[in-house]
């Protein structure tokens, strides 16, 4: 689709916009709500049903690096096969 996406187990967990000014992470809806908070920051639900299901758009120039890293890691855990998540947790 003309932009980078990031996959684990063949499933997309994050993508980068064509101009690399925004990213999308796939989160569970409760984690999405925690990340968005009051709603006027760099994190917004994607439009339509995608956003209802947890897809979250990040305006990268407005977002802090540490929080983006945590969001990407959460998106990876949300999509990755359970054995990979277990192995990653064991290494931490």
Image: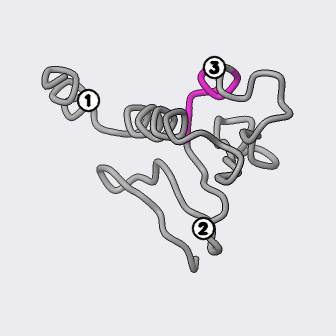
The answer to whether the residues at label 1 and label 2 have Cβ atoms under 8 Å apart is no
**How is the protein colored in the picture?**
one colour
Residues drawn in magenta = 26-33
Task: Examine the rendered structure and indicate whether residue 6 appears above or below residue 41.
Answer: below
Q: Where is residue 43 in the image (x, y as percent from the top left)?
A: 72, 39
User: What's the distance in space between the residues labelled 1 and 2, CA to CA?
Assistant: 27 Å
Mark-to-mark CA distance, 1 and 3: 19 Å
Task: Give the camera-side residue of 82 and 32.
Answer: 32
Counting other residues with Cα less than 10 Å from the Cα at mark 2, is it few (<14), some (14-19), or many (20 or more)?
few
Residue 68, horizontal then vertical, whole percent? 53, 40
Q: What element carries label 2?
A: loop
Q: Do the residues labelled 3 and 2 touch (CB within 8 Å)?
A: no
Left or right of residue 43: residue 72: left
Residue beneath the point at 21% across and 35% down: 84
Residue at the disc numbered 1: 85
Instruction: Of the two numbered discs 1 and 2 on the same chain, state the one appearing first in sequence.
Output: 2
Determine whether, in the image, residue 22 is placed left or right of residue 11. right
Q: Which residue position is annotated with label 3? A: 30
Q: In which quarter of the image is residue 7?
A: bottom left
Q: For marks 1 and 2, give the one nearer the viewer.
A: 2
**Label 1 packing within 10 angstroms: few (<14), some (14-19), many (20+):** some
Secondary structure type for disc 1: helix
**Residue lying at 55% horizontally and 73% vertically, measured from the top left:** 3
Q: Which of marks 3 and 2 is nearer the N terminus?
A: 2
Residue picked out by circle 2 = 20
């Amino acid at each position: 689709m003309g932009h980078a996406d990031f996959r684990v187990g063949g499933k997309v967990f994050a993508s980068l916009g064509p101009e690399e000014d925004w990213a999308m992470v796939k989160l569970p809806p409760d984690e999405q709500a925690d990340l968005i908070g009051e709603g006027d920051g760099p994190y917004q639900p994607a439009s339509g049903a995608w956003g209802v299901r947890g897809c979250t758009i990040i305006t990268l120039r407005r977002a802090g690096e540490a929080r983006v890293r945590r969001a990407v890691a959460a998106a990876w855990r949300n999509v990755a096969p359970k054995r990979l998540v277990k192995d990653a947790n064991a290494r931490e």
